[in-house]
Amino acid sequence: MSWYSIIPSEILSRKDINASEKLVIGVIISLSHLKGHCFASNQYIGDCVGLSDEAIRKIIKGLD
């Protein structure tokens, strides 16, 4: 991987979002900027942040 993530300060400063959720949001934002959308699998996002695809599924579901 040769891209980077910028997590907006309004996300970083939120107390109701934990660190793992913030990382996932950062990956989704970065992938969206690269291609205009994000259709990455939970496994791919999990590999990026060191979490299982099941953990990513729970995080994304909780962010709805």
Image (cartoon, rainbow, N blue to C red):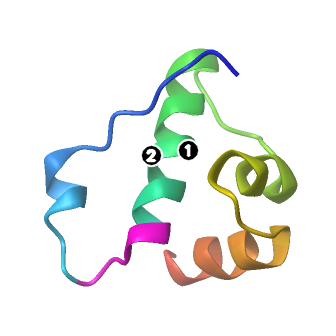
Q: Which residue is mark 2?
A: 26
Residue closer to the observer: 8 or 4: 4
Q: Is residue 12 left or right of residue 17?
A: left
Residue 27 falls in image quadrant: top right
Q: Which residue is pictured at 23% across the width and 44% down the height?
A: 8
Magenta stretch encompasses residue 11? no
Q: Residue at x 48, y 25 (%)?
A: 4
- Is 18 part of what is drawn in magenta? yes
In the rendered image, the quadrant that contains the N terminus is top right
Residue 20, image x and y in percent?
A: 49, 69
How many marks overall? Answer: 2
Q: CA distance from mark 1 to mark 2?
A: 5 Å
Mainly helix, strand or loop, the magenta region?
Answer: loop
Q: Which residue is mark 1?
A: 28
Q: x and y percent of residue 56 in the render?
A: 70, 69
Which kind of residue does numbered mark 1 sit on?
Ile
Residue 2 sits above or below residue 12 on the image: above
Magenta range is 16-20
Q: Whole-percent x and y of residue 57?
A: 74, 74
The image position of residue 17, as x and y in percent, is 33, 77
Q: Residue placed at 61% from the left, 71% from the top?
A: 60
- Give yes or no for contact between labels 1 and 2 (Cβ–Cβ under 8 Å): yes
Residue 16 appears left or right of 20: left
Amino acid bearing label 2 = Gly
